Amino acid sequence: MTSDIRLAFAHPEERSVASASADPRDRISLRDHVVEVEIGAFQQERGTTQRIQFNIVVEVRPQPQPLDDDVDKILSYDRLTEAIAAELSAERLNLLETLAERVAERILAEPQAMRAFVRIEKLDRGPGKLGVEIVRSRAEAPLRAVGQDGTEEALHPLVAFLDNAAIAAPDLSDTLDDLQSRGLPVILTVGLPDLARPQTGHKPTQRRIDLLAIEQNAWTLAARDDRCVVVATRTEIDWAVKHGQMIVWAPSKLVLDAVDGPQSRDPVALALWLAEMMAAAGIVVHGDVAVPAGSRVTVQRA
């Protein structure tokens, strides 16, 4: 049996280890969790319950401070079973695929969760087990907010990259009006300013200098329109997006704190990384700048 085939049928724990980076994360797992529920698309599955089994592995970000044996500082196993119970109670589903997606999305809403492996199997549909398995990362998990009808809904903001010409343009207000008119929360990103900056010849320190220079440009943009609020942390971004604010991203903290953050200093690459992490509806790029290939969000040239 080849390694690929063996891993295809291995427990999610083994699959997460096999696909880990050179700097692997901590993991928590839920094994062989069986729930009896009505689920399925076929007529014979309606009006009756069947057993489904969950195996879940979650990769978590390193704990920056001592745990002190405090349960509030870790991602509790209860969060995994609660995610399953919440999605099963929300509505009757036809597909295991839908259930797996929703369970993974709910788990990845937890601050510590970075990647989730979810395997769900039907135990009563034949002589063997019938199931699905998905892998989802935090970059693919949208924010969730309570809608006007009281139900949760996913939020997919619009990310925009503004070059220096767009920032300095006399019609900047019109550009921001156009972005806001799309009906989505807007996150503005910027590049390096047209100013000389120190050159260290040392990649780690140069990276920090470049990130700080981008932040100077963010404050320059904020000074040109009162709608723009500079934010730096994921908590600030999440709050602003949920409240529909137009924000300008100061990247240093988020990029440097990220477990598997971008290594590139290119501002457009950083904007794309943010768009993927925020599960953005798309990114609008202003200016004649190169856009890295392979983005998982839709890229639109202004």
Image (spheres, rainbow, N blue to C red):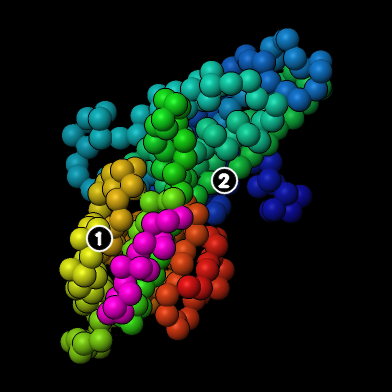
Q: Is residue 217 above or below residue 47?
A: below
| Quadrant in the rendering for residue 158 | bottom left
Q: Earlier in the sequence, mark 2 or mark 1?
A: 2
Q: Does residue 58 appear anywhere in the picture?
A: no
Question: Is 216 situated left or right of 291 in this image?
Answer: left
Residue tagged by mark 1? Answer: 228
Residue 14 appears left or right of 78: right
The label on residue 135 is 2
Against 49, residue 21 (above or below) is: below
Left/right placement of residue 131 relative to residue 212 reads right
Pick whichever, 101 or 26, lies toward us.
101
The span shown in magenta is 167-182
Q: Magenta region's main secondary structure?
A: helix
| Amino acid found under the numbered disc labelled 1 | Cys
Position of residue 49 measured from the top left corner of the image (x, y, whole percent): 69, 12
Residue closest to the eye, 85 or 116: 85
- Is residue 174 inside the magenta stretch? yes
| Residue 145: x %, y % from top left | 39, 36
| Callout 1: SS | strand
Percent position of residue 105, x then y: 49, 38
| Tag 2: amino acid | Val
